[in-house]
Structure formats: structure tokens, C-alpha cells
Image (spheres, grey):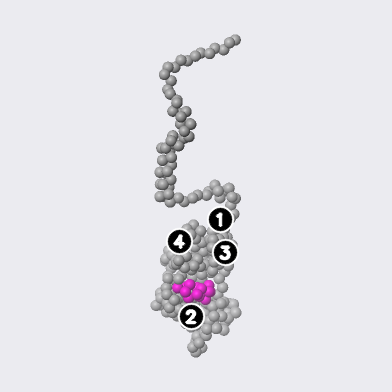
Amino acid sequence: MEPRNDDELNDRELDRMLAEWKAPLAPARLRAAVFPDGHRPWWRTVWSASIRIPVPALALMAVLIAIVIWQWPAALSPALQQKVHELRPVAELRPVLIRSVE
Amino acid sequence: MTSEQAFDQFHQAVYNFAYRLARRQDVAEDITQECFLLLVRDPQRFDEARGTIKTYLFSVARNLVLKHYRDHRLEFPAEDEPPSAADPFRAIDVSSAVAHAVAGLPLLQQEALILFEYEGLTLEEIAAVLGADVGTVKSRLHRARNALRRLLAPYRNTENTHGTA
């Protein structure tokens, strides 16, 4: 340590004086301000939950959904498809009146 | 490390750092809150390759303090400006005298001194926070301590006393 004149503090004196400057404690409300969910009921957290979806992923999902909708009849089971194909429009309507017997 | 663990471990240190630079508890609280909210809301901004969570938080806090000073048009002493002499009649105790003397240092010396003396960061960590090299940090610390030796010398005999000046 280099010699110092009386107008200057030495290292030990300076360290001791610096240690006198104390900072106050951080307020406890800081935690609640940063993590408000810790004090909310779970259903409110679920209700206000959100997710972030990147635009390319969203676009891909939209394309996939469109393809699925477009291909929907082909996606049905063969038996069901057969029944659907058997349906034909009625050639002639013959309404029958049924009267109740009193 | 989760953001809650980071909060538990570092919020007091970040608060202390902001308080000592801004010298106001409300500003220190706002800065600490903003600092951790940024970590919670946008954790991708912390890049492990560029430093630890500790240095990241201190550098965010530092930027927020600088923003506070810019927004309120407050000024730190310039780097080449000599530190203002501590006025023994303004400080009522040693703690106030130290706060006043540190406030008279240029900002670059203040932040290096606070991170080293009070928050216990290593020279390498301080260099990462300030975006400077270790040699520059050492030099700033040296100049800050030399200035404080002179500025605080009048208080040598007033230690542990209150309201004496």
C-alpha cells in the first residue's frame, strides 16, 4: 500500500467508511408485483391463460385444417361412404294421408 | 434457474444497486420490478452464452437507471470532470457523506465502485455488466477509490456518530 498524507484515507479507513453506507431492504410487495399469479385462484389463472403461436406455425395449422376439411368425405369409413352413395333423390313424391280411427 | 429462483437470489442485490445509483427508493423499486418482469415475460432475452443471469440482471438494471436519468433530464458528472468536494455541512453522518461523495463521482466510476464494493462482483463480472474490458474496470475503480480517499478524509473522525456535522 502506498503511503498517504493526512488529507487522504488509507485503504482500511476507506473500506470502513464505505461499509457505513447501507441500502434499505427491498419492499416485500415487489414479489407480488413481479409474480401476481401466486396470489390468484387457479381458475382465474386458467381463464386468463394465453399461448403464443408463431405465424408460420399458425399458417401451417390453417393449411392442414383446410386440407382435412377438403378431404373430409374421403376420410369417412368405406361402409359409411357406401351408404351415403346409395342415397338417391326421390323420383316421384307420393304423400300418403293417414287418418286416425275414432 | 427459474425466474422465481433468480428473483429470490438477486432481487435485493439489484435493488441495492439501483438504489445506490439513483439514490431513491421508489426508483429502485420500479427498476427492480421492471428488471424481473422483463425476465419473466421475455426470458429469451437472456443469452447464457453472453454471461450469467446475475450479470444480465445487473446490466438490465443499469440500462434502466440510465433511462431514468435520461427521461428526467438528470445528469451524472462527466467522466473527465473532477469529483465535487463533499460538503461536511451537508452530510449529517458518515453514511450520508459516503452517499454524497459517491454521487459526486462520474457515472462510470460510480457503477464500477458500487458493483465491486457493495455487490461483490468480480472484475470480470463487472466488465460483462458494463460492456468494458477488465483493465478499464480496474482503472475506474482505482480512480474512484482515490477520489473517495480525499473526499471522505474530513469524515475520518466522525465515524459512528450521527448528526455531528
CA gap between label 4 and label 2 equals 34 Å
Q: Say few, some or many: other residues with alpha carbon within 10 Å of mark 4 (under 14 / 14 to 19 / 20 or more).
A: few
Q: Chain of mark 1?
A: A
Badge 3 is on which residue?
A: B8
Q: For the C terminus of chain A, give its image quadrant.
A: top right
Q: Nearer the viewer, mark 4 or mark 2?
A: 4
Q: Secondary structure at mark 1?
A: helix
Q: Say few, some or many: other residues with alpha carbon within 10 Å of mark 1 (under 14 / 14 to 19 / 20 or more).
A: few
Q: Secondary structure at mark 3?
A: helix
- For the residues labelled 1 and 3, say whether their Cβ atoms are less than 8 Å apart: no
Residue A24 in the image, given as x and y percentages of width and height? 57, 69
Number of the label disc, if any, that sits on residue B45: 4
> In this orientation, does residue B115 appear?
yes
Q: Nearer the viewer, mark 1 or mark 2?
A: 1
CA gap between label 4 and label 1 equals 21 Å
Residue A1 in the image, given as x and y percentages of width and height? 50, 87
Above or below — where is A42 with respect to B96?
Answer: above
Residue A74 in the image, given as x and y percentages of width and height? 43, 35
